[in-house]
Amino acid sequence: MKTFFNIFLSATISLGYLAVSQGIQTQVGVSESALVQKLLAGSSGITVTSSSLTGNANCAAVFSDGLVAVPLPDAFPDDGIILSSGGPASLSMQDSDSQSLCFNTPGDSDLDNFLGSSITRDACVLTIDFTVAEGITGIVFNYVFGSDEYQEWVNSQVRSETPA
């Protein structure tokens, strides 16, 4: 059984409504294989056949000490990967009203097709092709979606049509 998994997040991973404090450690510019290893750490029965990272070389990172930054184990992981349309190293500075980084790279063609226009920018897409061992009936990926812009636009008339 071959399964395709494609992660696309259109904003820096954060909690949106919770300020992320200093303390989270990020390593930016890691290879897609390092991202895949971090994502699948501790998993068994999964064989990765190929992987690729589309976007700016610095759009992705691995992180640790997440619970130091956000001490809510049910809401935020202690370690994982970040896929960002901006700078993943600035995760701890989200909601600063001045945090901005544009890579000026293309958006995601699948998302643009879904929306009916080419309005997305700075996509960071991790594509993983893998097979699973016989007997495995499901795979679960936990994720947190957030936006640096949440605090600036919450309760406004601006509405995002971009699905996560």
Image (cartoon, rainbow, N blue to C red):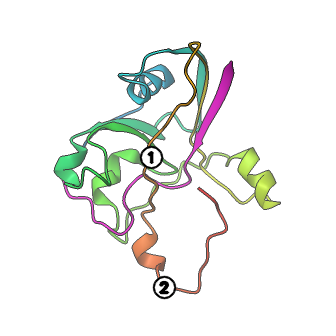
Magenta-drawn segment? 1-22
Q: What residue type is labelled 2?
A: Asn
Query: Along the line of sight, which residue is nearer the eye, 115 or 86?
Result: 115
The part of the image, by quadrant, that contains residue 51 is top right
- Magenta part, dominant SS: loop
**In 3D space, how far apart are the residues under numbered discs 2 and 1 (Cα atoms)?**
24 Å
Magenta residue check for 17: yes
**What is the secondary structure assignment of the residue under circle 2?**
loop
Estimate how packed mark 2 is, as few (under 14), some (14 to 19) or many (20 or more) residues with alpha carbons within 10 Å: few
Marks 2, 1: nearer the viewer: 1
Q: Position of residue 116 (x, y in %)?
A: 83, 60
Question: From where the camera sits, is residue 38 visible?
Answer: yes
Estimate how packed mark 1 is, as few (under 14), some (14 to 19) or many (20 or more) residues with alpha carbons within 10 Å: some
Provide the residue designation for mark 1: 143
Relative to residue 90, is residue 19 depicted above or below?
below
The part of the image, by quadrant, that contains residue 159 is bottom right
Q: Position of residue 91 (x, y in %)?
A: 33, 52
Q: Position of residue 64 (x, y in %)?
A: 25, 37
Relative to residue 40, is residue 28 depicted above or below?
below
Quarter of the picture holding the C terminus: bottom right
Q: Which residue is drawn at 31% across and 44% down?
A: 77
Q: Residue at x 43, y 30 (%)?
A: 39
Q: What residue type is labelled 1?
A: Tyr
Quarter of the picture holding the N terminus: top right
Provide the residue designation for mark 2: 155
Q: Which residue is drawn at 25% across and 45% down?
A: 66
